[in-house]
Amino acid sequence: MFKVEQIDHVELFVPDRHEGARWYERTLGLIVVPEFEHWAEDARGPLMISCGGGTKLALFTGEPPGSRPTAGFHRVAFRVDGPRFFEFLEQTENAPVPVDADGESQELRPPALRDHGRAFSVYFRDPWGHRLEVTTYDEAYVRSRLA
C-alpha cells in the first residue's frame, strides 16, 4: 500500500516573501532553506522556510487571506516540547501576535492557552491573516508549570 513519508510543505501567500520570512523567523524561528533559496529568484517561485526539519512553508507572492473566512486548509500547527511552549508564550509578552479567538483576531499578550486534555495549544494569526497554532503534547510539563 502506498504511504507518504511526511508533509513536505504548505503554501502561503504573502505580499512580500522576504518580509514574511523575517516575521516567521522572529516569531517561530523558521529560517530560509538555503538549498531552495534560488527558487525565489523567480518572481513566481517560492521562498522555502523551515525549522530545520523536513516540513517547510513555501511563501509565495500573492494576496493573503486577510480577514476573509477560510476555504480549504484552515490552520497550520507547529509542535514544540513543553519548555519551548512556555518560551513561545514568554516571547509574545514583548512581541504580541494577533490571536485567533473563535474567528476574530485580537492582539493579546500572551495568547490564551487552550487545554485539549492531552495537549495544550495557542491559536494566532500571522500579519497576513493565516491561522496558526503552537501546540505541545507535553501535557504533564505544562500542568506542572500551571500548578
Image: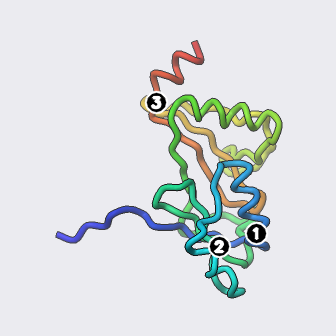
Q: Which residue is mark 1?
A: 18
Write the residue at 71% across / 63% down. 21
| Residue count near mark 1 (Cα–Cα under 10 Å), binned few <14, some 14–19, many ≥20 | some
Mark 1, mark 3: which one is toward the viewer? 1
Tag 1 secondary structure: helix
Q: Is residue 82 above or below residue 19?
A: above
Tag 3 secondary structure: loop
* Residue situated in front as seen by the camera: 130 or 141: 141
Q: Which residue is mark 2?
A: 47
CA distance separating discs 1 and 3: 33 Å
User: Mark 1 and 2 residues: CB-CB less than 8 Å, in contact?
Assistant: yes
Q: Which residue is mark 3?
A: 138
| Residue count near mark 2 (Cα–Cα under 10 Å), binned few <14, some 14–19, many ≥20 | many
The quarter of the image holding the N terminus is bottom left
Judged left or right of residue 16, residue 142 is: left
Write the residue at 25% across / 67% down. 3
Q: Amino acid at mark 1?
A: His
CA distance separating discs 1 and 2: 8 Å
Write the residue at 71% across / 36% down. 111
Judged left or right of residue 64, residue 53 is: left
Q: Amino acid at mark 3?
A: Asp
